[in-house]
Amino acid sequence: MSHHASGPNFGFPRGDARLDMTDLYAFTNPGDAGKSILVLNVHPSVAVNPPGLTTKEPFKPEALYEIKIDTDGDAIADLAYSVQFASSEDGKQTATLRRTQGARAAAVCDDGEVLVEAAPVSVGREAPVTRAGDCRLFCGWRSDPFFFDANGLFNNMQFTGDDFFADKNVCSIVLEVPNAALGTNVVGLWARTLAKTGEGWIQADRGGRPMQAVFLPGEEREAYLSGEPADDDRFIGVFAHALEHAGGYTPEDAVGVARTLLPDMLSYDPRGPARFPHNGRTLTDDVVDVFFSMLTNGKVTGDKVGPHGDLLDEFPYLGPPHE
């Protein structure tokens, strides 16, 4: 399930659904190839363990939501977009978007350049968009674009095409920026959520590529979720062991495949068409089929589920939330 319940025992990081990162997308604006769309989805509307609805509050006020961007290939952020949320007494939320550049982008980015302040957070079907210079921002509940026969997974990978996520929601941060803001080369993207504690900021969840944070770290999951892409070599052996078990890979081949998955970043070149796993990720890319084909070494090639039909043709592209 992508990152939908990436914490221990299919729970949420730090026990808080609002800190759970579900998916990261990057693609060029379909109507303007000079701009890129970055989508960070968090907070699934439904929990798996224990099953049931999560909180209605979209984002955690005492949290930080970051999209990290590596522009020079060293798996260390050179640019970051971060969003913090504030809740008023009537329960409404607003968002503040910041941009941090240079060496500071690799750290906690709660004090960068403010691009947008007090943007409204949507809790209904409406999609209020805030413009600031050459950026656009949307934050709020949306229909979850992720598609997967999750129940088939728990039935020994006997997939029937039953899309568990067809009527589910997530909380989305959708950002449009000029391609020039991302640099002139291929970039590496990942996102993370951080919680404010008495000891300072604590990383709760992170990831760039879909699915793997749930299925491959095994007993090292908490260490993985709290880690950094620049240190991901330490998980190659863990990933390889999981691949040997799930796909029957030889030890050598398993290590080779694991190296293609780490560091955990989404490679994106805004100069070309987006399609996972080669370049970024669109809202209709069938990442489940790609992942399970790799995980099982070709034994399972699909779950018989396709993209959702409620996507929009315009910003913020994700459909309105389900009731």
Image (cartoon, rainbow, N blue to C red):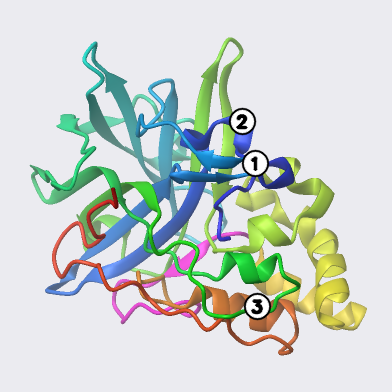
Q: Which residue is mark 1?
A: 11
- Mark 2, secondary structure of its residue: helix
Q: Which residue is mark 2?
A: 15
* Amino acid bearing label 3: Phe
- Distance between the Cα atoms at labels 3 and 1? 21 Å
For disc 3, the neighbor class at 10 Å (few under 14, some 14 to 19, many from 20) is: many
Task: In this rendered view, identify the residue nearer to me: 178 or 72.
Answer: 178
22 w.r.t. 124: above or below: below
- Distance between the Cα atoms at labels 2 and 1? 7 Å
Residue depth check, mark 3 versus mark 1: number of the one nearer the observer: 1
- Mark 1, secondary structure of its residue: loop
Q: Residue at x 63, y 45 (%)?
A: 228
Residue 73 painted magenta: no
112 w.r.t. 172: above or below: above
- Whether pointer 2 and pointer 1 mark residues with C-beta atoms closer than 8 Å, the reply is yes
* Amino acid bearing label 1: Gly
* Picture quadrant of residue 143: bottom left
Residue 275 painted magenta: yes
Q: Where are the magenta residues, as a range?
A: 263-278
- Whether pointer 2 and pointer 3 mark residues with C-beta atoms closer than 8 Å, the reply is no
Q: Quadrant of the N terminus?
A: bottom right
Give residue 119's position: percent from left, percent from top.
16, 32
Q: Residue at x 87, y 75 (%)?
A: 244
For disc 2, the neighbor class at 10 Å (few under 14, some 14 to 19, many from 20) is: few
Give residue 182's position: percent from left, percent from top.
31, 58
Q: Residue at x 73, y 44 (%)?
A: 9
Task: In this rendered view, identify the residue nearer to me: 134 or 4.
Answer: 4
Q: Nearer the N terminus, badge 3 or badge 1?
A: 1
* Amino acid bearing label 2: Gly
